Image (cartoon, rainbow, N blue to C red):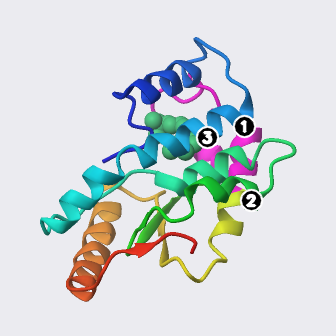
Amino acid sequence: MRFPDRTTKIGQLISSYLEKKSNLEDHSVHLLFSANRWEMVPLIKQKLEQGINLVVDRYAFSGVAFTSAKPGFSLEWCMNPDIGLPKPDLVMFLQLNPNMAVNRGEYGIERYETSAFQRTVHQRFEELMKDASVNWKVIDAARTIEEVHRDIKVLSEDIIRLTQNQPVGELWR
Ligand code: 2DT
């Protein structure tokens, strides 16, 4: 799965905002991003109950890091709407210097894709990673796709083995 899921009604509002085709008030769009996760929770739970392992792109951590990079938004306020979401067993942070990210495909087209904003987002991620209740692993994404893939695969297989029969936790609770 990936978030935002741009296919739902809420996701379409978000997508139009990211593509700069519409403007939304900052608090309001933050809550829409969160609602876009909550609307998928029944499906997430159903899949987990069927024994399916989920690999999820972005999720609540991007929600907090991006909105709290805007002036006047605390980490705490941003976390609130996502408290209680299904908690990932592992969160992999693909670390890439914002100066290098600029050279990645299609950078700069969507909202938020400026170096100054990305640097602040990076600082917010650093703050989030201090929270020991989440199992963070940092992956150096400046290497080749094959090397990054190998690390992700090893970490994923390990955590699947480790948490196989454990109940799903609640994020930030
Ligand atoms: P991509 O579709 O390229 O991943 O970009 N974002 C994402 C938020 O601001 N809040 C959120 O809750 C989430 C999940 C990050 C999506 C963009 O939307 C931002 C980049």
On the picture, is 82 further left or further right than 116?
left
**Percent from the top left, x then y, of residue 127?**
71, 68
Q: Residue at x 46, y 61 (%)?
A: 85
Residue sitting at 80 percent across and 55 percent down? 74
Q: Pointer 1: residues within 10 angstroms few (<14), some, or many (20+)?
A: few
Check disc 2 and give the amino acid type. Answer: Leu
Q: Indicate which disc, 3 or 2, sits on the residue closer to the N terminus.
A: 3
Front residue of 112/63: it is 63
Question: Alpha-carbon distance for marks 2 and 1?
Answer: 13 Å
Say whether residue 76 is left or right of residue 170.
right
Between disc 2 and disc 1, the foreground one is: 1
Q: Residue 125's image quarter?
A: bottom right
Question: In the rendered structure, does residue 109 fall within the stretch colored magenta?
Answer: yes
The correct choice, above or below, for 85 with respect to 2 in the image is below
Which mark, by number, is residue 75? 2
Q: Is residue 39 left or right of residue 77?
A: left
> Residue 156: x and y, percent?
28, 73
Q: Amino acid at mark 1?
A: His
Of residues 25 and 140, the one drawn nearer to the viewer in this rendering? 25
Q: Amino acid at mark 3?
A: Leu
Residues under numbered marks 1 and 3 in contact, where contact means CB atoms less than 8 Å apart: yes
Q: Mark 3 or mark 2: which is in front?
A: 3
Tell which circle, 2 or 1, labels the residue nearer the N-terminal end. 1
Q: Which range is magenta?
A: 98-122
What x and y, as percent, mark residue 158? 26, 83
Q: What kind of element bears circle 1?
A: helix
**Camera-side residue: 115 or 89?**
89
